[in-house]
Amino acid sequence: MNKAGFAVDREKCLGCGLCVRVCPGAVLRLEGGAPVIADFENFGWNGCWRCEHCLAVCPAGAISVLGKTPEGSLPPAPEGAAETLDALIANRRSCRRYQRRNVDGKIIDGMLSQLANAPNGGNKQLVEFTLLDDMESTERFRRAAYRRMEELAARGVYPRGFDKASYADMKRWEATVRPDMLLCGAPHLLIPHAPRGSGEPVRDTMIAAAYFELLCASRGLGAVMMTFPLDSLENMPEVKALLEIPEDHYTGVIIGFGHPEIRYARGSQRKTDESRIHRLRI
């Protein structure tokens, strides 16, 4: 059997060639009225990209690949999906107050599984996820980092981009909107990271983070994307080491998430100002 496990039910196949036209690795061709896959050495640029486009595009459901069959696929987005996505985007916001309870592990696992569908360079799937899915573990990490951050601030050592005044502003906000200036009180943390020197680690990790935030919103969970804790951790390598993220990996954001303490009654009415849109005619 070929490496990709590419198989065609010839009784169903229409010979339409759509699978050939959408294959990014150009390893499919029509032969005898049905698609066949070329031999290739490795998955990736010069072989099968493991994208499943062929399986997904086939109107007759005749193609199986990588151990996946058409019967296992989700259907296309239903009518009205645009309105649903608009509502999710308009209602998403940074959550800085959370309930003190864990999110069900099955919900977290389901969201992480869906992140395999986030766009990434060459479909290399190199993004890894460091997860604190137990609020007690998150709290122990927070205490260790917070204690060290305060010790450093007392010596005049602040995270990148901060000084005494801006740090004091953050501390003052703890009395109102931000009860925990470091991690916003989030019971769970997700940190996407990817190896430097391969694929697109910066773009891939940030896209995965954006998708995860929307997955949280669709499940009624709050989320917040944070860079301040990453800058803080750079001053405390012994605490950063607790996350066990490889030194050669790029990390651009920490996502806090959990059940929100405060529910919002409606979405925002922000619109992109026309002055920020540069329409070209070339």
Image: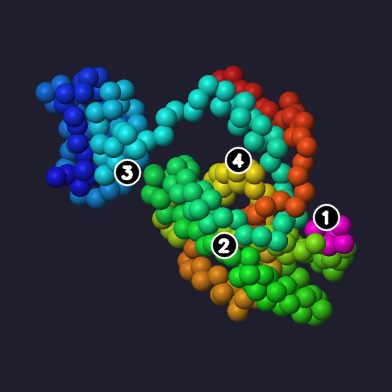
Count residues near mark 3 (Cα–Cα under 10 Å), then give few for <14, some for 14-19, many for 20+: some
Q: Nearer the viewer, mark 4 or mark 1?
A: 4
Q: Is residue 166 above or below residue 65?
A: below
Q: Are the residues at dot 3 and dot 4 in contact (C-beta closer than 8 Å)?
A: no
**Residue 77 on the magenta span:** no
Check disc 3 and give the amino acid type. Answer: Arg
Q: Earlier in the sequence, mark 3 or mark 4?
A: 3
Q: Which residue is mark 4?
A: 218
In this view, the residue in front, 275 or 239, is 239
Q: Percent from the top left, x then y, of residue 131?
A: 54, 62
Is 177 one of the magenta-colored residues? yes
On the rendered structure, is 218 left or right of 200?
right
Question: Residue 154: x and y, percent?
Answer: 82, 79
Q: Secondary structure at mark 1?
A: loop
Left or right: where does residue 1 sit relative to residue 185? left
Judged left or right of residue 239, residue 128 is left
Tag of residue 50: 3
State which mark lies toward you, 2 or 1: 2
Q: Please give the name of the residue rendered at 73% of the width and 59% of the height, measured from the top-left corner.
A: 184
Q: Is residue 245 visible?
A: yes
Q: Amino acid at mark 1?
A: Val
Residue 237: image location, x then y, percent: 61, 76
Residue 177 has which mark? 1
Q: Amino acid at mark 4?
A: Ser
Q: CA distance from mark 2 to mark 3?
A: 29 Å
- What residue would you read off at disc 2? 133
- Name the residue located 31 percent from the left edge and 33 percent from the top edge: 70
Q: CA distance from mark 2 to mark 4?
A: 19 Å
